[in-house]
Amino acid sequence: MGTFASTVHVYTDTLLPKELGSFSCFSEGWQTMLPRDEENFEQDRKIARRLSKQLAFPVLWFWEFDSDEYGFVLFSDGKQKTVFSTESFSEPKGLYQLPPLIGYPTGNKQRLSKILSCADMECSIAMLEEYFGVCLEVFPELLETPEALKRTRSEEKYRAYLAEEKRFSGKHAPIGVELTEELFGKVEHYPVFGDFSQPKAHIFYLAQFHSYEESVFPLPAVEFRGGKLLPADEAAIRVAKTSIRGAGGTDSRFQKEYYPKRKVTFTDDAPAPFRGKVFTVFPRGYYPYDFDLSDRLILANGRGGIAFMNADGEILSKCSLKGNLTDYRDGYFLTDSTPIFDPWGWGFNPEGVLRIYRIIDRT
């Protein structure tokens, strides 16, 4: 079960009446609500909205889920002025209304956009704290060292990020990606009728219709190979149904542990440079996904972020894919615009885009 954490901050130096809650000023220009004994994610949201009705100051509500997703809402006069979430189903609203509400002059839009598009969650939150000038992750154990909760507005982390992006993601980075094909459709891992065994070796069911009236069932099976979605033959489908690799399966090359800390142990099935090694340090939100053709570890973060790591645990390059990473094979990535496809059930969206990216190795 996932865990939530959320915080509430009022954009003011003015001391707030005690009847509104327990607040403290850790960073100049902000009053932060202290953690309660029983934190409630949705209750914090309601508190933020209520405070914005009672006070003549903007109120920021920030939330984080399992170190994988985060978002925030800026309230003013009880209304949502700015809404942002890293969840793929959520659309940002009013982002460019935010800067003037928290004291920035006209502009700062490009900086905010780059911060929120950063695929590394830890880096993105750190830059956002620097942008707001307030600590967004206020955990009870930090209250004993209030200096640890102090944030100052600057561009230090942002400029460091731009320099790192140029190094890891620019045209001189050793590894990059290139979009090779974009086509209409969605893919599903599960067959539509009868057989609920799960294909796991690059086999998908392809939907290319805009309405139920145009639908064709059962959906045709396709295989992702050679950077293309090609008709899958029965032999490939039989192999897929007995394979242990791929979506939903267990990859025998590495064993992942998430608690009490992230740890990845590479088995004898991994490429030779990784065998027997244990990694505990990854960019926040990234997890081992596969190995490329040069035996480098591919990391993915669920937000379109891809990173390449060598056997010494060093990041070599970072890339961004548009859409949700669905598969990797033969030096190509497949992404789908929607992570879940249900042709009969709730939430069906008849539009969809599939994209295929090729790895560019500049080494």
Image (cartoon, grey):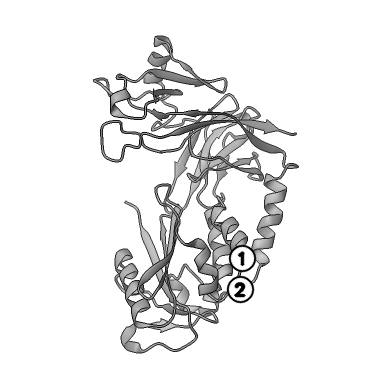
Mark 1 lies on residue: 108
Q: Nearer the viewer, residue 23 or 314?
A: 23
Mark 2 lies on residue: 105
- In the rendered image, which quarter is residue 6 located in? bottom left
Q: Secondary structure at mark 2?
A: loop
How crowded pointer 2 is (Cα within 10 Å; few <14, some 14-19, many 20+) is rated as: few
- In the rendered image, which quarter is residue 217 located in? top left
Q: Nearer the viewer, residue 175 or 255?
A: 175
Q: Amino acid at mark 1?
A: Asn
Q: Position of residue 168 (x, y in %)?
A: 69, 46
Determine whether 43 is above or below 52 in the image.
above
Q: Nearer the viewer, residue 15 or 240?
A: 15
C-alpha span from label 2 to label 1: 8 Å
CB under 8 Å between discs 2 and 1: yes
- In the rendered image, which quarter is residue 257 located in? top left
Residue 134 in view here: no
The dot on residue 2 is none
Q: Is residue 182 left or right of residue 205?
A: right
Q: Position of residue 155 (x, y in %)?
A: 66, 67
What residue lies at 36% left-to-right and 89% top-to-bottom?
A: 17
What residue lies at 52% left-to-right and 74% top-to-bottom?
A: 102
